Image (spheres, grey):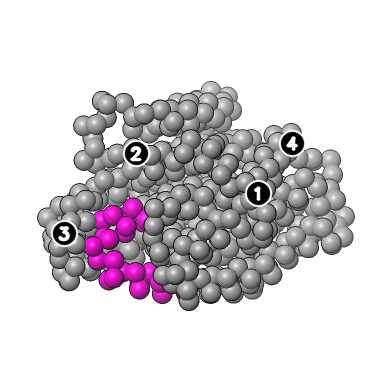
Amino acid sequence: MSVIIIIFLTAVIALFSGVFEQGKWARYIGIAGLLVAFYVAFLPEHQFFAKYNSMFIFGENAALFTKISIVITLILFFLGGFALSNHRSHQSELYSLILFSLTGGIVLFSFQNLVTLFLGIEILSIPLYVMAGARKSDLKSTEASIKYFLMGAFATGFLLFGVALIYGSSGSFDLYAIHEFGIANPKNLMFTMGCVLMLTALAFKVSLAPFHMWSPDVYQGSPSLITTFMMTVVKISGFVALFRLMTIGFYGVFGEWINILAVLVIITLLLANFMGLAQSNAKRMLAYSSVSHAGYIGLIFFGINNLSTYNLAFYLFAYSLASVGVMMCLIYVEKIKRESSFKAFNGLGRSEPILAVTASISLLSMAGIPLTAGFVGKFSLFAQAMEAAPILVIIAVLGSAISIAYYLRLIIAMFFHEESTFNTSEKVSLTYNIVAVFIIAAIISLGVYPDLFAMQFGL
């Protein structure tokens, strides 16, 4: 609860800093607040907040995912000086909305009650609807905002209908009371229908196919820094909420929903990877890549054991680092070229080698190539699911093999194609290069020595 209060107050201060000098201090205020929140996340929760335990418990798992989300958000704030340079008149609003959305994500890491789950999802989502349409003169950005809002409202309807059925059958909103009811009444039709509706709603939020249809358009139309936030922190929040809900609240009816989830994972892995092959726009390709990773993460529900939460955290962190590594490269290319096609990346390896190497290592990590964090993350998920769902693992390996083809297209464009239109006078800033080196070091270090993850996050 202390972390939520700090981030919320930081968001409010950053918002009102826009009154002075067009909000130029909002980014620094956000960075300072996130650093304080990261430190506080390592401290034991104050006893004062025990009175809220029926709604919200900031335990070890919640603290772990909170630290991961804060680290990723911090990196995005460091990149924001360049990425949001076209939004100087409302930078304070964008930074504060990112922090408000992060607040909702932290609520989802800790919810004990279906009401808290609903509040967390809405706090996470509503700022995103606004940020998706931040480029007011761009019709694609406006389309992204409207489409995200409409699909989000649609998913919320499913969620609330499911909550109503769960409460009507179990008589409680409490996650553990629902868990006990599910164990005692595994064949209750109303309870099962509520479970399926809530699974459907959260499948929208994490972009599991066929509920992914909003993702490519929204990711492509939104400002690229906001897209990166959606691909990382928002996906972390959605999957942790889904994992808590299904493995605690609905574990008693495991057999009723696991086959549905298996079908969603298969559709996601095959559809997203084949669609990724067909793209000519790098940003849209990365959107389908993000959808495919939702399928890989979905394997966490098969063969659940004591390491499942750790495996989920490791994969989400590795995936988020790689996503930031690729997207920071795309942000630079978009700024210079005003487009994000594969051709726009031609020759980037010559003009900005550090940035191109960062993107390449990140793409290799996404593909699951050995000696990268992505390989360790995928191996952990595949090994966990192998005994319980070997067919899913085989399909996931096939999906990973397909993904290599469209990831290599971007790497080949950066290093093996001639280019003469980069404006060499506009070089990448020192901050960008520092972030790039950090991401390279983190991806390779976690790939070679995975235990470093536990050491850095106090596990």
Quadrant of the snapshot with the N terminus: top left
Q: Is residue 294 visible?
A: no
Return the disc, 2 or 4, that comes first in the chain's sequence.
2
The residue at which mark 2 appears reads as: 59
Highlighted range, magenta: 242-271
Return the disc, 3 or 1, that comes first in the chain's sequence.
3
| Residue shown at 63% from the left, 62% from the top | 367
- Secondary structure under tag 1 reads helix
The residue at which mark 3 appears reads as: 181
Dot 2 amino acid type:
Gly
- Location of residue 66 in the rendering, given as x and y in whole percent from the top left corner: 44, 40
Q: How would you classify the magenta stretch by its main secondary structure?
A: helix
The residue at which mark 1 appears reads as: 448
Judge the density around disc 1: few (<14), some (14-19), many (≥20) Cα neighbours within 10 Å: some
In magenta stretch: residue 451: no
Return the disc, 1 or 4, that comes first in the chain's sequence.
4
Comparing labels 4 and 3, the label whose residue is closer to the camera: 3
| Residue shown at 41% from the left, 74% from the top | 263
Give the left or right position of residue 189, taking residue 295 as reference: left
Q: Is residue 111 visible?
A: yes
Judge the density around disc 3: few (<14), some (14-19), many (≥20) Cα neighbours within 10 Å: many
| Residue shown at 68% from the left, 42% from the top | 441
The residue at which mark 4 appears reads as: 429
| Residue shown at 53% from the left, 26% from the top | 32
Q: CA distance from mark 3 to mark 2?
A: 24 Å
In magenta stretch: residue 270: yes
Return the disc, 3 or 2, that comes first in the chain's sequence.
2
- Secondary structure under tag 2 reads loop
Q: Are marks 3 and 1 in contact (CB under 8 Å)?
A: no
Return the disc, 4 or 3, that comes first in the chain's sequence.
3
Q: CA distance from mark 3 to mark 1?
A: 44 Å
